[in-house]
Amino acid sequence: MKDDRTPIAAELSRELSLFHVTMMGLGMMIGAGVFLGIGNVIHVAGPGGVLLTFTLNGIIALFTALSYAELSSAVPKAGGAYNYARLAFGRGPSFTAGWMEWFASSVAGSLYAVTFGIYVVRYFESLGLTGWMPLSTYTTEKVVAFAIAMFFLYINYRGASETGKVGAFFTLGQTLFLIFIGLVGIIVALKDPSRIQNLNPYLPYGWTKLLVAMGFTYVAFEGYEVIAQAGDETIDPKRNLPKAMIYSVGIVTFTYIAVAFASLVAVKAGTPGVEGVPWEWIGQFKERGFGEAVSRLMPYGNFFLTLAVIFASVSALNATIYSATRASYALGRDRMLPGIFSKISLKRKTPSVALMFTGIIVIGVAILLPTMDVASSASIMFLLLFFLVNVSVIRVRLNMGDELNYGFIMPFFPWLPIIAIACQGFLAVWLVHMSKIAWIVAPTWVISGIAIYLFYSKSHAISTEEEIHVFEEEHAPPSNQYHIVVAVANPENAIPMIRTTYYISEAKDAQVTLLHMVPVPEQVPLPDAGKFMLEGKEGVTEVMLSLMLKFPITTTIRYCRNVARGILSSVREKRTDMLIMGWHGRHRSHTFGLGSTVDAILERSPSNVVILKNCGNKPYKRILVPWGGGPNGALALEVASIIAAKDESEIVAFTVNDPRRNINIPPISDAYSNQGQVSFDRIRFKVTQSQDIVNTILKESEEYDLVILGSTRDPIIRQIARDSVTNAVARRCQKPMIIVKGSGGIRSWIKRWL
Amino acid sequence: MYKGLIIGTGIMALALGFMLYIIFWSRKTIDHIRKKNLKSAREIDKSLHERR
C-alpha cells in the first residue's frame, strides 16, 4: 500500500492556559441560546421549571464532562471524540465521530454568525442608523454574518493564543454580565422577600413539561468538546483539560440558575404594566422574556442584553470555528481525510487548510441554508457524539486502563456515564420532534460520512499505536464445536500446557486455536515487530505437533503493545468458550494481584479462563480443590474431574471455615446442579476450622500434586486492596496450580460487548 | 401550597450539593494524581482507595 504520509515538521504550539481553555468552554456554552431560552422555558415549564431545567441539565452535562475529562487527560490530542472513539472502537466509528463533530461544530458556528448578524442589525435599527443602507434587512444580516465569520476565521488563522485571548475577552465580558444580573436578582429578593412568591406555583404544568424544557436548553451546556480539541495547544494538558471541563460546567450551571432566578424575581406583581402573575407575564414574551425581565431589574436592561447577546454570539462563534477546525485537522492527521487537512502553517502554527474548509461550511450554511433546522440536526449530532464518548470512556478504561497515562479518573465509574447515556438518549429523541428537516440533514451527513469512509478513509487511514495487527491467521470453518483458545508465549511456556490442554479439549470435543500475541516494546515501531515473532512461532509449532492429530487446530499470530488486550480482543472476536494460558508465577508489582496480564484476563475475559502455573507433563494423582462455593469453584471441580478421569486421581474438596465469620458455604451439589462433567464419586470432602485460611490451604497443598483454585468474583481493585485468598494462595503455593474463572450470564455478555 | 416549592428547592439543593462535591473531589484527585505521579487507571484507583 502506498504511504501518502508527508513529513510535516511543524506542530501546534502550546500557549493556552487553564484560564484560556476554561473561557473557551464557557464561550461555547454561553451562546445566544440561553438569553433567548429563559423566557421560553418559563413559558413552557413555569418558574420552578426554569430553575430545575438548568440544575438537572447541569448535572447531566457534568457526567458527560467527567467522561471527556477522563479521556482528554489520557489522550490530550486535537480530535476530541474522534480520538476517543478510535481508541475504543477503531477506525469506522471514529471516522463517523470526527465527521459528525466537524459538521456539528461548523453548523453551530453558522448559527452564531447569523445570530450576531440579526442582533447587530436590530441594534442599529433601534438607534435609527440603518435608513441609509441600500440592502434589505435580511441581506444586511447575512452580510454582517459573513463579515464576522471571516473575522473569526482570520483570528483562528492567527494562532491559538490569539483565538484563546480574543475568545477569553468576549467570554469574560458576557459571563461577568450574567453574574452581575444574578447578583442583582439575589439582592432584590433579599430586600423584598415577597418576590419569592413569584416562584409559586413551582411546576404549574407538571414534570413532563420540565423534560421538554430540558430538551431544548441542553445545547447551552455543550462546551467541553472545544476544550478537548485544545489538547495539542494547552499548557500541561493532563491537568488543565479536565479541570477546565469540570469548572466550566460548574460555573455555567450556577450562573444560569442565578440568572433564571433574577429573571423571576425581577418583576413585582401588581406594578404598572405587569398583568397577571409575574412568571406568566415574563413567559408570554417567550424569546424576549429575559430582556423584558432584565429591563425591570436595572436601567438600560434591554440595551445591555443586546450587547450580551452580541458578545455571546462572537465568543461561541470563535469557539466553534476552533473546535470544527481541530476535528477536521485530526481526520487529516490520521489520513481519514486527505493529508492536506493536516497541513500546518509554518508561520502561524495553525491548521490552515482545515480552517479554510471549515470556513467554507460555516459561511456556506450561514448564507444559504435555514440555519435553525440545520442547527437542530447539529444538536442531534452533538448528543450522538456525547453518547459515543460516554460509551468510549467505559470501554477505554476497561480495555486500556493499564496502558494509558491518566491525569484524572471519574468517581462512581461506570454509573455516571451510564446515567448520562440514558438521559442524553432521551433528549436526542426529543430533539427529533423539534425539526423535521433535522431528521433529513443529520442522517444524510452521517451516511455521506460512511460512504467516504468506505471508499477513501478505510484504505488510507494510518494505523495507530494502539491497534492490534494480524501477522498470520488461519480461519477455521464455522462450527458449533466448543472453542478453546490456547495463548502461547514461547516453547518453555507451551510444552507444559500441552497435557492439560489435551485433556480438556478431548473432554469438550473442542476445536482449538493457538494464539501467539507478539509483545512489541513501546520504543520499537510496529512495522519492525516481525523480529519479536520467532519465539512465539516455535511455541505454537510445539503445541501444534502434539495436538493436531487429535483436534482441528488453527493458528493466529498477532502483535500489539499490550498482550492482555490483544488476547482479550482475540477471545471476543473468535467467540471463544475457554481460554487456556500459562503463568510464570512471579509477582513484581503491588499494583496487580497476580500480574498485569493475568489480572486483566481474569477480570475481563468473557469466556471461561484456565491459567496454568508450574504444570508439567507428569500425571497428578492427588488434586486439591479449595472449596468456598460459587461458579468458579464449580468450574475448578469440573477441570479437576477431567484431569482425574485421565490420571486416575483422587480429588479433595477442601473447605476452611473461619470461626470468626459466619459464612454459609453451599454444598457442591447446589453450585453444580446441572452441568455434566464433575465426577462426584472421585471427590472426597474435607472441612477444617482455622482463622488463617491462606496458610491452612498452603499447608494442606503440600500433600498434593496439583492445586486447582476458583478465582474470586470480586472486582480486581477490591482484591488488590484486601488481597484475596485466591491471589495470596496463587502467589505463594509452590505446587503445580491451575486457576480457573467461569463465564456465563449477563456479566459475560457485557464483557464480550465491551 | 408551598409543597412544590419545598420539593423543588430540595431537589436543587441536593443536585447542586452533589455537583459541588464532584467538582471539589475532581480538583483534589487531579492534584493527587499529579503529586503522586500516578499513571494507569488501576494505580490511581488503588491510590484513591488508600486515600479514603
Image: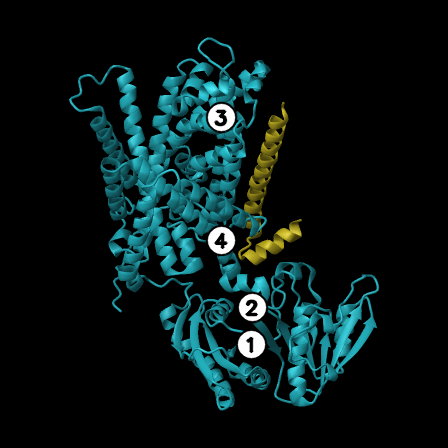
Q: Earlier in the sequence, mark 1 or mark 3?
A: 3
Q: How is the image coloured?
A: by chain
Per the rendering, the colour in which chain A appears is cyan
- As drawn, A586 above or below A11: below
- As drawn, A94 above or below A102: below
- Residue A656 location, quadrant: bottom right
In the picture of the structure, the residue carrying the numbered disc 4 is A393
Q: Earlier in the sequence, mark 4 or mark 2?
A: 4
In the picture of the structure, the residue carrying the numbered disc 1 is A581
Q: Where is residue A209 shown, x and y percent of the image? A: 49, 33
For mark 2, name the chain: A
In the picture of the structure, the residue carrying the numbered disc 3 is A260
Residue A184 visible somewhere in the drawing: no
Chain coloured yellow in the rendered structure: B
> Label 1 to label 3, Cα distance in Å?
61 Å
Check contact, mark 4 vs mark 3: CB within 8 A: no
Q: Residue furthest left?
A: A134
For mark 4, name the chain: A
> Label 4 to label 3, Cα distance in Å?
33 Å
Are marks 1 and 3 in one subunit?
Answer: yes
For mark 3, name the chain: A
Q: Counting other residues with Cα less than 10 Å from the Cα at mark 3, is it few (<14), some (14-19), or many (20 or more)?
A: many
Left or right side of A646 for A597: left
